[in-house]
Amino acid sequence: MDSKVEPGDVIGVSRILYEHYGVYIGEGKVIHYHMKNSEIKLTVQETDIEEFLGGASTFFILDCEYRQPHKSAPIKYREAEEIFSKVKVFSPEDTIKRAKNKIGEGEYNLFLNNCEHFAIWCKTGIRQSHQIEELLWFIPRIKQSAKTALCL
């Protein structure tokens, strides 16, 4: 465990096609959307950090004090995104309390309530997923590129 991570931090791990997010609550535990082998849907659960990492050896901490959260360095990749005005963040204790109150919730929705929405909401009260925002930004451009390519 990296000594920089503190209880109440929003942490993430890079997977092949996406990033997975959760709230670190201390003592090697994370609350995040997770699917146990015997379940058929994702629910908010408390797991150990190893299960959260899913075989990865590194993770990042998401700095949620800005309208556009950015990641720590050098724990894991990607430079800070453009920073806008600061937003209110909950204390570590309140962040953990908010996460614990959602344990058992099964309202996962890729576009409206995914693991990133959940973790950022626990810290800021704002439901955001920058991964989904980026995807929605790219879709019309891909469609336009395809139309242009067909016309050539």
Image: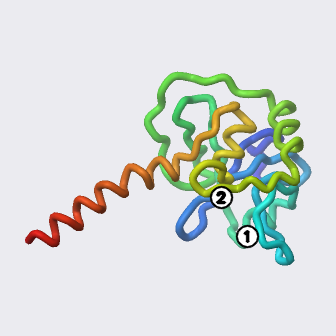
Q: Which colour scheme is used?
A: rainbow
Is 127 located above or below residue 16 in the figure? Answer: above
Residue 80 in the image: x percent, y percent?
49, 41
Mark carried by residue 93: none
The structure residue drawn at horizontal position 72% and vertical position 35%, both measured from the top left corner, is 123
Figure quadrant of the N terminus = bottom right
Closer to the camera in the image, 26 or 85: 85
State yes or no: discs 2 and 1 in contact (Cβ < 8 Å).
yes
Quick one: SS at disc 1?
A: loop
Query: Is 136 placed left or right of 27 in the picture?
Result: left
- The x and y percentages for residue 61 are 66, 46
Quadrant, the C terminus: bottom left
Percent of width and height locating residue 46: 87, 56
- Local crowd size for mark 1, using a 10 Å CA cut-off: few (<14), some (14–19), many (≥20): few
Query: Which amino acid type corresponds to the residue marked 1 in the rendered image?
Result: Gly
Count of numbered circles in the view = 2
Figure quadrant of residue 52: bottom right
**Disc 2 secondary structure class:** strand
Residue at 23 percent of width and 67 percent of height: 146
Q: Residue at x 68, y 53 (%)?
A: 115
Say which residue label 2 marks: 20
Cα–Cα span, label 2 and label 1:
10 Å
Where residue 10 appears, as percent x and y from the top left, is 71, 44
Q: Which amino acid does label 2 sit on?
A: His
Residue that label 1 marks:
54
Q: Is residue 113 above or below residue 127?
A: below
